[in-house]
Image (cartoon, rainbow, N blue to C red):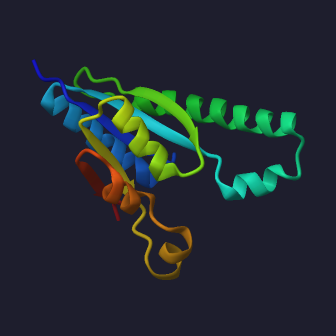
Amino acid sequence: MFRPDILCTTDLSDAATSGIREGVQLAADLGGTATVLFVVDTGPVVQMASNLLSESQHQELLAHATRDARAQLEALCEQEAVKGVEPSPVVVQGPQVADAICEYAQQHGSHTIVTATHGRGGIAHMLLGSVAERVVRTAGCPVLVVRRPE
């Protein structure tokens, strides 16, 4: 029997919760499973800040961020469980959030990625980019983008 695995992504914002809700509901409707993924960003900004820290302080900072994210994800997964589908929380680290999401999906055989968008435009989009946009362009599986509720 086919049991799709739905990968829901989050940045732990309120906007991302709508994507998780949609993804878990999709998993429930299809008789599948759901995973909620958070990526601890280890990219250039974090690297610049880490230059001010010792290696052990940098590692402790990343460990703390990972533990904190895991605790938040566990609570979020309990809150968003529906129809017998309790999503599994997963935290990974990566220098490019979108790349880490696509890599996780490929390595774990995710059938669909569900991600929310903040709907930024103009200068904010140009400066911050869009993780959702990059995931859509580079993922090896279908991507469902959930727009931030107004």
Q: Is residue 108 above or below residue 133?
A: above
Look at the image and tell me whether residue 133 can be seen.
Answer: yes
* Residue 134 rendering spot, x and y as whole percentages: 40, 60
Q: Quadrant of the N terminus?
A: top left
Residue depicted at x 28% and y 46%: 140
Q: Is residue 13 visible?
A: no
Residue 34 appears in which quarter of the rendering? top left
Between 87 and 95, which is closer to the camera in this rendering? 95
Residue at x-position 43% and y-position 77%: 121
Could you tell me which residue is drawn at 30 percent across and 55 percent down? Answer: 146
Asked whether, in this view, residue 38 is left or right of residue 134, the answer is right
Front-most of residues 117 and 137: 137
Vertical comparison of 69 with 126: above or below: above
Q: Position of residue 55 (x, y in %)?
A: 85, 38
Toward the bottom, the furthest residue is 122
Q: Quadrant of residue 150?
A: bottom left
Give left or right: position of 108 versus 71.
left
In percent of width and height, residue 122 lies at 46, 82
Q: Nearer the viewer, residue 79 or 22?
A: 22
Residue at (50, 76) in percent of width and height: 126
Residue 81 x %, y %: 33, 28
- Find the residue positioned furthest to the left: 1
Number of marks in the image?
Answer: 0
Q: Is residue 53 above or below residue 49?
A: above
